[in-house]
């Protein structure tokens, strides 16, 4: 296990290094941030002064070297717009996005697995067909449109839930969170559901497919032949087997959830990373964009590692292969 | 043997599958009895309904199949109409089953310990430690070395033969009256098969457990079973004492089966084979199901043969029994 983790960490650092190069070069060939920052009537000397201040007069490879040296010390540069460290800007907004993503993930798992298993156990039942039809809608309706419709229905017409912002927040483990206050929870509900719909559909389909496959296995019949109760057969023998693909896919999709939150955050004016990155892209605030992408890359790498570890806990056969590797 | 004392008495069992293409009569009027400590061999080709008979007794026939007629008496009590909870308590407790493919019967993600302890706890109010001790003893009983250690292992850490031993140990856990073994040695190599047969026989003799050994391999039951039922197309065509059936098979199908087992006498010669294939159970023509493949079939065979008793202790369904000595 330890050898496996160390090997994976080394592979991951190579991925991060390559990504940093791609991201840095990619961002540097798009547009000229000086045009955005400076008064259009400024003279050449002024422009050159700003470029020098921002380090944009140096060749790209030199800028990259400078970026890497600083990044290794935890400094991802200063925002052109705010004049604050880019990392700090992002980290400040990170809890909001993570809270939204985790809430969406929880909804997807807590609703998706039982619904999927039900649909798998009785595929011919009307309720099962309704669940599957619903999951198709969840897949195919565009997230932003559903978001707007939800605001229309629940915020505007029914007036049950607020449509924008995070509501009241309280500190929790050093972060500001919404879910611990009643007002915050109300604000969280609509965006979290909106963000979860796609993943919910995915989990339902995975759980159903897994159930359809596992329920016909001999070991399920054997478990019944042992005289186990139906609840034990389903909740232990079946569930533990279908959790393997569900956990794998969900782990990998968590990164996507954070990335997709850009749309939901925009629709619900949720003050998270997604909204920041959209604004930064508009204003060509390179350090913030680069810092955001680096953080996302890092996050994907860490999530993949965690998924592999959880996977090996769920599936004992994986453990053996690690030991022999 | 009277029906009341038999461990298991199956009377006129019919299990049909209601498919879109029509009704498949997988088991169509099967009757037999198994007494205490008795080993009964249920022999037949693939698709003859022998496994479905086993699953019917466990009430584990998957839809669209269901028992449509007949009685299954376990110690005189009918299993067919039994309510779900009582049936659950019977399964794995009084009637245990061993499956064909040991690679598939154990849950890959649960420890052997979990899978054994839960089988005990499902039926008796003992502590986890006691259940664990019972599991360890059962593993020892089927000849698994260092059972304490092996309890912690996962199924993939066992070979096929060892897994089948674990499955047998699970079947033995609650000291059942009856074990239904559905081709338990088919997937194993011959030396392991021999060991398992020997142990199964020993267990039945020692504990008085009755056993139904389902197989397509006549050679296996020849050395194991006390009695043999030969199944063909959902019916038992011949039934009797093992030695008696092997010496004097009366049904042409049984004769064919015995004739097609390679032996020292047939060495060098062309091995006998039964012509044709098992008929489709869908839309089975009336009359004797074997008549298309039967070397001695005649006009009488258009009519379904009734059960007759042509020899002492022998049941037969054939219009043209072969009562002279075996070929």
Image: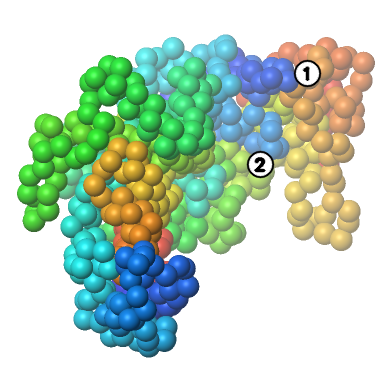
Check if mark 1's residue and mark 2's residue have beta carbons within 8 Å.
no
The foreground one among A316 and B268 is: A316
Residue B154 percent across, percent down from the top left: 36, 57
Q: How is the image coloured?
A: rainbow
Residue A106 percent across, percent down from the top left: 28, 41
B98 horizontally vs A311: left or right: right
Kindly state the secondary structure of the residue where label 1 is placed.
Answer: loop
Callout count: 2
Residue occupying image coordinates x 31% and y 44%: A265
The foreground one among B186 and A209 is: A209
Residue B216's disc is 2
- The answer to which of marks 1 and 2 sits earlier in the sequence is 2
The foreground one among A265 and B249 is: A265
The foreground one among A113 and B30 is: A113
Label 2 lies in what chain? B
Can residue A228 be seen here?
no
Q: Residues within 10 Å of mark 2 (few under 14, many from 20)?
A: many
Residue occupying image coordinates x 35% and y 27%: A150
Can residue A140 be seen here?
yes
A97 horizontally vs B180: left or right: left
Q: Quadrant of residue B69?
A: top right
Picture layout, residue B312 above or below residue A209: above
Residue B325's disc is none
Q: Residues within 10 Å of mark 1 (few under 14, many from 20)?
A: few
Q: Which residue is mark 1?
A: B283
Q: Quadrant of residue A44?
A: bottom left
Residue occupying image coordinates x 81% and y 26%: B290
State the separation of the CA atoms marked 1 and 2: 24 Å
Label 1 lies in what chain? B
B189 horizontally vs A240: left or right: right
Picture layout, residue A23 above or below residue B11: below
């Amino acid at each position: 296990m330890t050898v496996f983790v160390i090997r994976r960490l080394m592979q991951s650092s190579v991925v991060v290094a390559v990504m940093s190069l791609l991201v840095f070069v990619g961002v540097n060939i798009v547009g000229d941030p000086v045009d955005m920052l400076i008064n259009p009537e400024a003279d050449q000397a002024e422009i050159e002064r700003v470029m020098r201040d921002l380090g944009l007069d140096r060749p790209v490879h030199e800028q990259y070297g400078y970026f890497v040296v600083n990044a290794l010390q935890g400094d991802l540069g200063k925002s052109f717009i705010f004049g604050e460290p880019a990392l700090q800007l992002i980290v400040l907004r990170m809890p909001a996005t993570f809270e939204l993503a985790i809430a969406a993930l929880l909804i997807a798992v807590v609703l998706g697995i039982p619904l999927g298993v039900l649909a798998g156990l009785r595929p011919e039942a009307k309720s099962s067909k309704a669940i599957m039809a619903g999951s198709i809608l969840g897949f195919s309706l565009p997230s932003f449109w559903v978001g707007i419709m939800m605001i229309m229905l629940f915020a505007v017409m029914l007036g049950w839930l607020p449509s924008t912002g995070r509501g009241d927040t309280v500190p929790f483990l050093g972060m500001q969170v919404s879910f611990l206050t009643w007002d915050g929870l109300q604000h969280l509900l609509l965006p979290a559901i909106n963000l979860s719909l796609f993943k919910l559909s995915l989990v339902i389909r995975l759980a159903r497919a897994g159930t359809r496959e596992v329920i016909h296995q001999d070991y399920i019949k054997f478990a019944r032949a042992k005289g186990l109760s139906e609840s034990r057969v389903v909740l232990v023998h079946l569930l533990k087997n279908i959790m393997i693909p569900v956990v794998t896919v969900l782990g990998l999709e968590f990164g996507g959830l954070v990335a997709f939150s850009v749309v939901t955050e925009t629709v619900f004016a949720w003050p998270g990373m997604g909204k920041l990155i959209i604004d930064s892209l508009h204003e060509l605030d390179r350090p913030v964009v680069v810092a955001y992408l680096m953080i996302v890359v890092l996050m994907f790498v860490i999530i993949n590692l965690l998924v592999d570890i959880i996977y090996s806990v769920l599936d004992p056969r994986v453990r053996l292969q690690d030991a022999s590797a | 043997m009277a029906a009341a004392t038999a461990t298991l008495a199956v009377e006129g069992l019919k299990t049909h599958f209601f498919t879109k293409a029509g009704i498949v009569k997988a088991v169509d009027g099967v009757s037999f009895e198994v007494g205490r400590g008795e080993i009964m061999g249920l022999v037949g080709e693939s698709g003859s309904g022998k496994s479905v008979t086993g699953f019917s007794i466990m009430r584990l026939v998957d839809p669209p199949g269901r028992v449509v007629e007949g009685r299954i008496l376990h110690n005189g009590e009918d299993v067919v109409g039994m309510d779900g909870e009582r049936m659950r308590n019977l399964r794995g407790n009084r009637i245990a089953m061993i499956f064909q493919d040991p690679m598939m019967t154990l849950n890959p993600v649960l420890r052997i310990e979990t899978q054994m302890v839960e089988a005990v706890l499902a039926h008796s109010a003992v502590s986890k430690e006691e259940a664990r001790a019972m599991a360890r003893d059962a593993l020892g009983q089927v000849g698994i070395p260092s059972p304490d250690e092996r309890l912690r292992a996962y199924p993939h850490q066992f070979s096929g033969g060892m897994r089948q031993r674990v499955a047998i140990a699970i079947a033995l856990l609650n000291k059942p009256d009856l074990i239904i073994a559905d081709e338990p040695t088919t997937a194993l190599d011959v030396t392991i098969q021999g060991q398992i047969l020997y142990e199964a026989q020993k267990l039945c003799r020692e504990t008085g457990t009755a056993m139904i050994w389902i197989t397509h391999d006549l050679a296996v039951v020849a050395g194991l079973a006390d009695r043999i039922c030969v199944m063909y197309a959902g019916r038992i065509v011949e039934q009797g004492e093992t030695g008696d059936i092997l010496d004097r098979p009366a049904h042409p199908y049984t004769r064919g089966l015995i004739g097609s087992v390679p032996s020292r006498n047939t060495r060098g010669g062309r091995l006998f084979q039964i012509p044709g294939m098992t008929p489709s159970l869908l839309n089975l023509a009336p009359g004797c199901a074997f008549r298309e493949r039967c070397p001695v079939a005649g006009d009488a065979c258009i009519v379904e043969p009734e059960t007759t008793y042509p020899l002492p202790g022998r049941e037969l369904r054939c219009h043209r029994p072969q009562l002279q000595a075996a070929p």
